[in-house]
Structure formats: structure tokens, C-alpha cells
Image: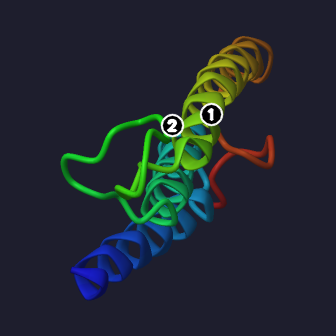
């Protein structure tokens, strides 16, 4: 299971980095979202989830770790705000510059 989790996070990071390095704004926004999904999964997998464990300590039984879940929820909220900001920023740049290139220049011909 750990290999599948590591492979999933690795693929998401690789796709996210590839998309961030593109020249258009929409792939950059998509790449940032993929990177944030990879970080969320990584944080979630660090909790070593226990199936059927109670969320509160009540005895000798193993309990679920609430810290990774809280970190993931916080990261989701921050990701939503940053995605909205980047989309508005890219729409503003598209309106003012007339193209959606990240560096502000048009395509070289």
C-alpha cells in the first residue's frame, strides 16, 4: 500500500511540475492544483490511517491521528483561496495584455 501511495504522490508532483512549467496561464493554474493535491495526499498518508479506530483516546485501542486531517483541511482552504487569486490574476493579465502567456509576451514567430 505504501508503494501505491508513494507512486500516486510522485505522479501528481511530476504532472504538477510539468504543468507549472508551461507557457500559458491555465496549465499553470492546473499544475498548482495538482501540486496541492499531491501535498494533501502526502500529509494525509503521513497519518497512517487505522481502519475502524476511534478518533478519541479511550483506552488501549489505537486511535486515529487527527493532526494530518487538520493539516489537510487547512491546506484545502488555503488552496481554494490561492487558486481563486491566481485565476483572477490571470484573467486580469489576459484583459490587460491581450494574451495568456505567463511571461507576458506573445508567441515567438
As drawn, which residue projects farthest toward the bottom? 3
Residue 101 drawn at (x, y percent): 66, 43
In the rendered image, residue 25, in percent from the top left (x then y), is placed at 60, 39
Q: Position of residue 30 (x, y in %)?
A: 47, 43
Residue beneath disc 2 = 26
- Quadrant where the image shows the N terminus: bottom left
Q: Nearer the viewer, mark 1 or mark 2?
A: 2
Residue at 60%, 35% in the rendered image: 70
Q: Relative to residue 20, is residue 54 depicted above or below?
A: above
User: Residue tagged by mark 1?
Assistant: 100
Mark 1 burial class by Cα count in 10 Å: few <14, some 14-19, many 20+: many
Q: Secondary structure at mark 2?
A: helix
> Dot 2: few (<14), some (14–19), or many (≥20) neighbours within 10 Å?
some
User: Disc 1, disc 2: CB below 8 Å?
Assistant: yes
Residue 50 position, x and y percent, is: 29, 58
Residue at far front of view: 59
Report the side of 97 relative to 12 (left or right).
right
Q: Sequence order check: which comes first, mark 1 or mark 2?
A: 2
The foreground one among 25 and 104 is 25
* Badge 1 element: loop
Residue ID at (51%, 50%): 65
- Is 88 placed above or below 63 here? above
Q: CA distance from mark 1 to mark 2?
A: 8 Å
Residue at 35% of width from left, 55% of height from top?
61
Quarter holding the C terminus is bottom right
The residue depicted at 62 percent of the width and 33 percent of the height is 100
Q: Quadrant of residue 76?
A: top right
- In the rendered image, the vertical position of residue 12 relative to residue 7, given as above or below: above
Amino acid at each position: 500500500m505504501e508503494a501505491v501511495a508513494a507512486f500516486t504522490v510522485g505522479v501528481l508532483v511530476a504532472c504538477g511540475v510539468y504543468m507549472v512549467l508551461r507557457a500559458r496561464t491555465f496549465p499553470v493554474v492546473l499544475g498548482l492544483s495538482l501540486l496541492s493535491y499531491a501535498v494533501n495526499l502526502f500529509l494525509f498518508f503521513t497519518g497512517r490511517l487505522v481502519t475502524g479506530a476511534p478518533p478519541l483516546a479511550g483506552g488501549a485501542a489505537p486511535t486515529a491521528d487527527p493532526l494530518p486531517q487538520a493539516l489537510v483541511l487547512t491546506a484545502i482552504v488555503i488552496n481554494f483561496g490561492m487558486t481563486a487569486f491566481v485565476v483572477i490574476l490571470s484573467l486580469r493579465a489576459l484583459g490587460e495584455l491581450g494574451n495568456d502567456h505567463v511571461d507576458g509576451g506573445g508567441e515567438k514567430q
